[in-house]
Image: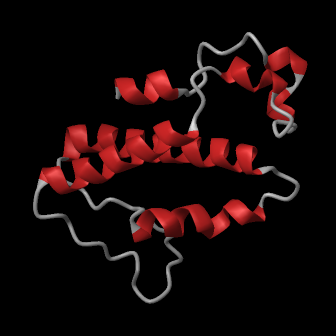
Amino acid sequence: MELWLQQLQEANIDLMVGASETEKNLIKGQALFFRAYFHCEIMKYWGRIPYVDFVITGNDGDFKLKRPATYKECAMKADADYAAAAELLPNKWDDLKNDPNAKLFTFKQQTFGNKLMRINKAIVYSF
């Protein structure tokens, strides 16, 4: 695993109190998907942009990001995020119904069967 991806996952995910490893992985997967998705959307209009893959604190000039030399550099980082998201997300969210580690509010009975707009492996692979 690349260092930047490891830093992202460790940055704030451990602040989730009472969450199981399954739930943390689901949150990580969704976060990685949306980071890649929004970078790709911005790249459509602005071309090569700095890929923000760390927490910007505003200290020490970390907000001064260099533009990548090629569009491919940014696209490959997005691709890595998509691949990591696909590893963490389920094929179908209803598969988690019997998972004892899925206990947060997202897995209440009323959410099952309502999976059309949830990010899953198929959606990630389509991007």
Quadrant into which the N terminus falls: bottom left
Looking at the rendered structure, the number of numbered marks drawn on it comes to 0
Q: Position of residue 59 (x, y in %)?
A: 50, 85
Specify the farthest residue to the left. Answer: 70
44 relative to 54 in the view: left or right: left
Q: Position of residue 74 (x, y in %)?
A: 24, 54
**Residue at the image position 78 percent from the left and 58 percent from the top:** 16
Q: Position of residue 102 (x, y in %)?
A: 81, 36
Viewer-closest of 58 and 89: 89
89 relative to 43 in the view: left or right: right
Quadrant into which the C terminus falls: top left
**Residue at the image position 35 percent from the left and 49 percent from the top:** 80
Q: Is residue 25 above or below residue 111?
A: below
69 relative to 59 in the view: left or right: left
Q: Is residue 118 above or below residue 47?
A: above
Q: Position of residue 47 (x, y in %)?
A: 17, 47
Viewer-closest of 18 and 34: 18
Viewer-closest of 113 and 88: 88
Specify the farthest residue to the bottom. Answer: 60
Q: Is residue 101 above or below residue 123?
A: below
Residue 65 falls in image quadrant: bottom left
**Residue at the image position 22 percent from the left and 40 percent from the top:** 45
18 relative to 74 in the view: left or right: right
Give the color scheme: rainbow, by chain, secondary structure or one colour. Answer: secondary structure
**Residue at the image position 60 percent from the left and 13 percent from the top:** 116
